[in-house]
Image (cartoon, grey):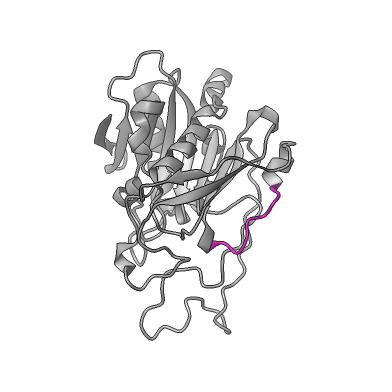
Amino acid sequence: MIDESVVDEKTGRKFYLAHPGQPGSDDHLTFLLNLHGGGSFGAWQRLYFPAKDYVDRYGLVVATPTAATAEPLRRWMPEADDEHLRNIVQIVFERFGLDRVVSFWLVGHSQGGMTSNRLLSTDYFAQRVDGWLSLSGGRFGQAEVVQDFGPPLQPGQKSRWPTGDGRRPRFTPPPLPTTDLSFIFATGEHEIANLPGTSPWADRFGAGRRRRLADVVDTEAGQTYDKERAGRSSKSWGLEPKPGTSEVYVYPDAQGGWVIADVVRLDKGHTEGLEPNITEELVKMMVNAPGGKAQRLRETV
């Protein structure tokens, strides 16, 4: 693996780029744009979802940037970040070649997942993205979060929600993207009230009824967690990392071969880093999913 810091010359901003050490000229590469959540940064995201550990085994190119807006909370913003994210995509396509980068996935944790969904409403990303892996970043067909979801309260703070009764306002999910792509939703068991048994995304592509696959068991813990809130966090927000088991559900036989899946990490919350086996399982799903959007776009230009 080659792990480097690359400069986006158009904006002057840097991002992490991990890719195979000795890729062959005929290799098929899967490109992941790995976006952190609100309040986080690229170095943490690389540990939370450590896809970089699998670049040689599965032919990945993993770009992990950091949002520009840091105050009052670091988060992805259209005016500050979209140009940089487009530039990263162009850098990867030009450096490795469209003949070799056969699939492009958005990967986003929390607000990075919501940003991925927003990007899919723009022509640039809609025309190029083959899949979205949402890491606790929203689901097509809402998975309601638990009432106490959110960062732990500060001393003296009565509620994290600016409503009159202090209850969490109901989230209205955005409309479904109009583009076609694979979609994987991964979440911690303690952050959602329930996982719906149906999926409007699966319905759109005529997929079969949800099927449960074999659980993925991890004997090793993830690589990071919310250390800033250690000792005062909650199960829903996330505790220290530990081994665990993940339930995997798929909606089979979708038109176009699109991969549609839900993954629930048992006894986990929002911020425990993903364990190695479930990380690898998600990587395999992405690598085996259909690709080719960017190549087809080139052919029509």
Q: Which is the main secondary structure of the residues drawn in magenta?
A: loop
Q: Is residue 214 magenta?
A: no
Q: Nearer the viewer, residue 291 or 178?
A: 291
What residue is drawn where x is 33% and y is 60%?
70
Is residue 231 toward the left or the right of residue 121 in the image? Answer: left
In the foreground, 74 or 234: 234
Residue 74, position as x, y percentages in the image = 36, 59
Q: From the top left corner, tell me how far across and down residue 8 is, in percent.
A: 30, 38
Q: Front-most of 97 and 27?
A: 27
> How many labels sit on residues?
0
At 57% from the left and 61% from the top, the residue drawn is 192
Quadrant in which the C terminus appears: top right
Tell me: 271 left or right of 15.
Answer: right
In the rendered view of the protein, which quadrant contains the N terminus? top left
Camera sees residue 91: no
Which residue is at the front of the view, 297 or 280?
280
| Residue 114 is at least partly visible in this image | yes
- Residues in magenta, as a range: 191-199
Q: Tell me where residue 230 sits by quadrant.
A: bottom left
| Placement of 132 over or under 20, stated as above or below | below
At horizontal 75% and vertical 36% (from top left) the residue drawn is 206
| Relative image position of residue 64 (x, y in whole percent) | 35, 42
Single out the residue that lies furthest toward the top: 26
Query: What x and y, as percent, mark residue 63?
Result: 36, 38
Question: In the current view of this chain or complex, which residue is farthest to the bottom?
Answer: 156
Horizontal side of 172 relative to 240 (left or right) equals right
